[in-house]
Image (tube, helix red, strand yellow):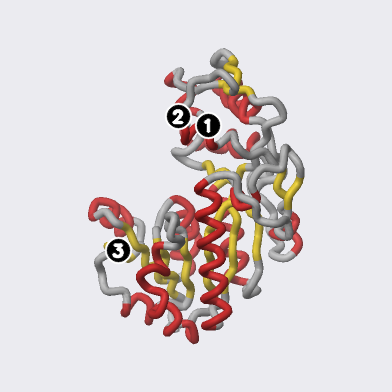
Amino acid sequence: MTKTLLSFGHGFSARALSRLLIPQGWRVIGTTRSPEKAEALRGKGVEPVIWPGADMAAPLAAATHLLLSAAPDDEGDPVLAVLRDEIAANADHLEWVGYLSTTGVYGDHAGGWVDERTPLTPATRRGHQRVKAEAQWQALADEAGLPLHIFRLAGIYGPGRGPFAKVRRGTARQIIKKDQVFSRIHVDDIAQVLAASIEKPDPGAVYNVCDNEAAPPQDVLAHAAALLGVDLPPPEDYATAAMTPMARSFYAESKRVRNSRIKDDLGVNLIYPTYREGLAALLADEK
């Protein structure tokens, strides 16, 4: 049977994984809501499916591997809301199922360390939605025997997603919150973690996916500005800065995320072990 990845919500991370799998002879089917995005996917060798809307019986029957990256809502995972029974009915031929979650499920730890055994105490609405979706997938895995793997992703950056554009435009903001740190991950490292898990499946496993150095956001911004040779924007105190609720919510949590499991269990050697290597590579790719 041809190795076939069915990817629900075929976005930034899924596209990076596809770039690894398609040259190896994989068939990749990816869902999108947009006809325009569907054509872009087709141009990259992905078979696009407009979903919700399309009949997913044939893609599910063909899939050997399932990747879920659609964002949940207050009811949980949108794929399960529609296709739970159909996925369960196809469990017997699925070799690997990956659910892309977030380190936001751990909530705020005031800069302290978390690992995969840390209790889930989300501090944001998005975090609560992810906890609910994780639980729904785990329940289906227990019920139907799905080979489920959960990947808790830190803040994602990569080509087209980084601080350079805002720094160049002068729209970047240096928001300072005492002792605030974030973990991050380059999208190419997400792809190699997923590929390593596919090669070495361990149903029931949970992996934190982040680089080696949690850092204050202003340090990352300062490094980007230095690489570009431009001045930093003036510092703004978080307590008094005018911010949207969405922007402010990103500062609701501060923690350092351990990534030992992706190294020890999957043998991953990060391409970009810190934001410094990642930003340097992004800038080099622009030239």
> Which residue is depicted at the point 39% across and 68% down?
81
**206 relative to 233 in the view: left or right:** right
Q: Which mark is residue 244?
A: 2
The numbered mark, 3 or 1, whose residue comes first in the sequence reads 3
Tell me which corner region of the image, top left, top right, bottom left or bottom right, holds residue 179.
Answer: top right
Question: 176 and 209: which one is in front?
Answer: 176
Element on which disc 3 rests = loop
Q: Are marks 2 and 1 in contact (CB under 8 Å)?
A: yes
Q: Position of residue 19 (x, y in %)?
A: 46, 58
Query: Which residue bears the numbered disc 3?
Result: 51
What is the spatial separation of the Cα atoms under label 2 and label 1, in whole angstroms? 6 Å
> Which residue is depicted at the point 71% across and 53% down?
259
What is the spatial separation of the Cα atoms under label 3 and label 1, in whole angstroms? 32 Å
Query: Which residue bears the numbered disc 1?
Result: 248
Q: Is 182 above or below relative to 14? A: above
Q: Which mark is residue 27?
A: none
Say which amino acid is labelled 1.
Arg
Q: Is 68 above or below relative to 247? A: below
Q: Are marks 3 and 2 in contact (CB under 8 Å)?
A: no
**Residue 189 appears anywhere in the view:** no
Question: 36 and 72: which one is in front?
Answer: 72
